[in-house]
Amino acid sequence: MEFSLTQSTLEETCLFEDLPLSKITLKALKKAGYQQATPIQAAVIPEVLSDQDVVGQAQTGTGKTAAFLLPILERFANNEEKTKDPKALVLVPTRELADQVMQEAIKLSTGKSFRIAVLCGGRPIGRQIRQLQSGVELVVGTPGRVMDHLRRGTLQCRHLGMVVLDEADRMLDIGFRPDIETILKKCPQSRQTVLLSATVPPEVERLAHNYMRDPVMCQVSTQKEVSADTIDQYYVSVQPNRKFDLLVHLLNEEQPEQAIVFCHTKRDTDRIAKELKSKVSKVAGMHGDLPQRARDRILKKFRTGQVRCLVATDVIGRGIDISGISHVINYSIPEFCDDYVHRVGRTGRMGKSGTAYTFVSRDQGHLLTQIEKRINKLLEPAQFDGFETNPDSVDRSPRKKSRRPRRTRAHDSGSTSPRKKNRPPRSSRSGGSGKPSTSPNPRSESSKSEGSPSNNGNFSPSNGKPKRSKRKYRRAL
């Protein structure tokens, strides 16, 4: 799909006063401490205000939220239409991001009559229904809960003038495509659609092609998504069974203002956070299986500095927008290059400096090479006292083509589809004696719990054997 590129999408900035914004909006911006528009804001805002469909691509932390909120406020605040139906809908991948969009909207709508409803799973739906019945101008929500309200008939899309898909690549990545397409089909064809994303893979292009009208693409720093001067990026060659010790040493050595440690799985997140609490102060772990109230409490502590180090999965970490994050540590190297872009984008936000470390074992060199090609930058090797290794020991030779690895990420939609278990034939499960087979099923690398001092990367801390499932044992009997 081809987009028409605007000339204002390179690296241009401007004052908000130079944009077609009302005096009351400029006053709210001044009160919030905003004076100069970022490049993505300078490119997107005029296009959206001219009723043009827009695809905006820029590094995370560059002000994309205000780029779509300001036009929404300009068009729909103080609206005199006598209807309780929302005028604008913003879809986001996570509850945390929905809350951040709401808080930004409240800050920018100072002096205006503007009602907002946040529709996310894990929260009382009755309160959301009452908000919608009383009337709102803006709805911010995750696709799953928005679909729930559409089925109930408590959310009406007939008066929507604008739909925004924020973090579109991530929403598609975690399986929201069917819900997004259903929602867009229920919206008026005359609506304006704005799509914002850190990356524009083919899936995002297809979505834009099917549901947008001649969109203009506003692209900012496409070759420097995470290679900006504000982020120092390193890789550390480390043996799997020494990764946890290195993590503790790095945190004590660097003394980050705030840090996010990214893990592949919920299991690793829980384990590392638990072990880290005995080594480092102000640590918390967060993933999609935690109750919403617990997640809100942890995130609030992280914002206020009561939590200094947050261990998180990709889906949760992606929804965090805190300018004080000084370090990102990839305890598990991302298997997909775009995930690296999103992870590292948690630091170095809004012009502040940041540092990113990626732990790499010898057999993960090909993943490191793919990341470097993706961001058009070589990561510098880093070494720490007591953990000296030869960076050349990382095997960067390309792997043979194989099936695309299955993601084992924690989805944040509130529900997960069950997976079929790979079981051996019935005869091998029960055998002649009625005992289960002792040979473990193959496991993908991303689903293994990564090395720590307690288990040295083995299956079990006790005897090195995989734990048997009691359920399987009963069935075998």
Image (cartoon, helix red, strand yellow):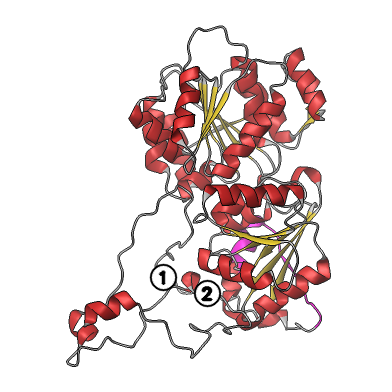
Question: For the residue carrying disc 2, how many other residues have a C-alpha within 10 Å: few (<14), some (14-19), or many (20+)?
Answer: many
Q: Determine the secondary structure under disc 1.
A: loop
Q: Nearer the viewer, mark 1 or mark 2?
A: 2
Asked whether residue 350 is in view, the answer is yes
Please tell me how many numbered marks the rendered image carries.
2
Asked where in the image residue 385 lies, by quadrant, the reply is bottom right
Q: Nearer the viewer, residue 10 or 190?
A: 190
Asked whether disc 1 touches disc 2, contact meaning CB atoms under 8 Å apart, the reply is: no
Q: Is residue 285 left or right of residue 8?
A: left
Residue type, numbered disc 1:
Ser
Rendered location of residue 407, percent (x, y) = 45, 61
Question: For the residue carrying disc 1, how many other residues have a C-alpha within 10 Å: few (<14), some (14-19), or many (20+)?
Answer: few
Q: Nearer the viewer, residue 270 or 382?
A: 270
Asked where in the image residue 331 lies, by quadrant, the reply is bottom right
The residue identified by callout 2 is 449
Residue type, numbered disc 2:
Ser
Rendered location of residue 119, percent (x, y) = 49, 34
The mark found on residue 402 in the picture is 1
The mark found on residue 263 in the picture is none
Q: Residue at 82% across / 67% down in the picture?
A: 254
Q: Which residues are magenta?
A: 368-385
Rendered location of residue 336, percent (x, y) = 54, 60
Rendered location of residue 204, percent (x, y) = 48, 42
